[in-house]
Structure formats: C-alpha cells, structure tokens
Amino acid sequence: MSQFDNVSVIKKANVYFDGKCVSHTVQLADGSRKSIGVILPSKLTFNTGAPEIMEIIEGSCHIKLPGGEPQAYGAGESFNVPANSWFDIETLETLHYVCHFG
C-alpha cells in the first residue's frame, strides 16, 4: 500500500534527537494510529510504550533488539518491537518509515 486514505493528520511534527528523526502522527478511520517519518543518518535508541511494527519504506538500517544481534533491514521489510522495550537503530542514509502502533 503506497498511501493511507481517509485519515486525520496531526499538524505538529514529532521531532526527536535534535531533528535526526521527524515524523507525523496519522489517525486512521478505524481508530488505529501510525507515525510516518524519516531518520537521518545516525545511531539512535528508541524506547517503546505500545508494541510497534516498523515498516521500512526506503533506505536501509541496522536494528538491535533486546537480547538480539544487530540485523540489517531495507525497503519492503519490517520488524516488531515489544511493548515497554527499546531498539537501537543505525542508519547510513535517510530512512523513510511507517510505525504501526498496537
């Protein structure tokens, strides 16, 4: 799917890590919430509250989840992050992503 239809978008951007990650929150008609954004080349650690599925739209990255080894992901791939957890991400190019919550 290349687009989301019938959505509400929060106008103010979510800006993290001094602008290295910028996203917008999207609310779908069914009540589900997603964020759509970019991560500039960097090494970052994200904490999670809800479970997340990170879908890579463009670019590539290395992800380390708790208890695991770093793994490469690229466009068309996704990874799951448990609730109340964390993940390390390293991007060498601008990464476009969709984060699916819950």
Image (cartoon, rainbow, N blue to C red):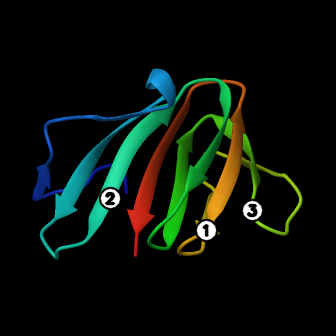
Residue 89, compared with residue 54, is above or below; it is above
Q: Mark 1 touching mark 3, by CB under 8 A?
A: yes
Q: Which mark is drawn over residue 85? A: 1
SS for callout 1: loop
x%, y% of residue 85? 61, 68
Mark 1 crowd level (few <14, some 14–19, many ≥20, 10 Å Cα): some
Disc nearest the viewer among 3 and 2: 3
Give percent across and percent down for residue 61.
71, 40
Q: CA distance from mark 1 to mark 2?
A: 18 Å
Q: Nearer the viewer, residue 18 or 23?
A: 18
Q: Which residue appears farthest toward the right when viewing the image?
A: 69
Is disc 2 placed on a helix, strand or loop?
A: strand
Q: Callout 3: helix, strand or loop? A: loop
- x then y, percent, for residue 93: 65, 24
Q: Amino acid at mark 1?
A: Ser
Q: Residue at x 44, y 72 (%)?
A: 50
Among numbered discs 3 and 2, the one appearing first in the sequence: 2
Q: Earlier in the sequence, mark 1 or mark 2?
A: 2
Residue 65: which disc?
A: 3
Q: Amino acid at mark 2?
A: Lys
> Of the residues shown, which amino acid type is indicated by label 3?
Leu
Q: Which residue is mark 2?
A: 34
Q: Are marks 3 and 2 in contact (CB under 8 Å)?
A: no
Q: Which quarter shows the C terminus? A: bottom left
Q: In the figure, residue 86 lies in which quadrant? A: bottom right
Name the spot of residue 34 as percent of width and height, x first: 32, 59
Q: CA distance from mark 1 to mark 3?
A: 9 Å
Residue in view at x 36 percent, y 45 percent = 36
- Image quarter hosting the N terminus: bottom left
Quadrant for residue 74, please give it. Answer: top right
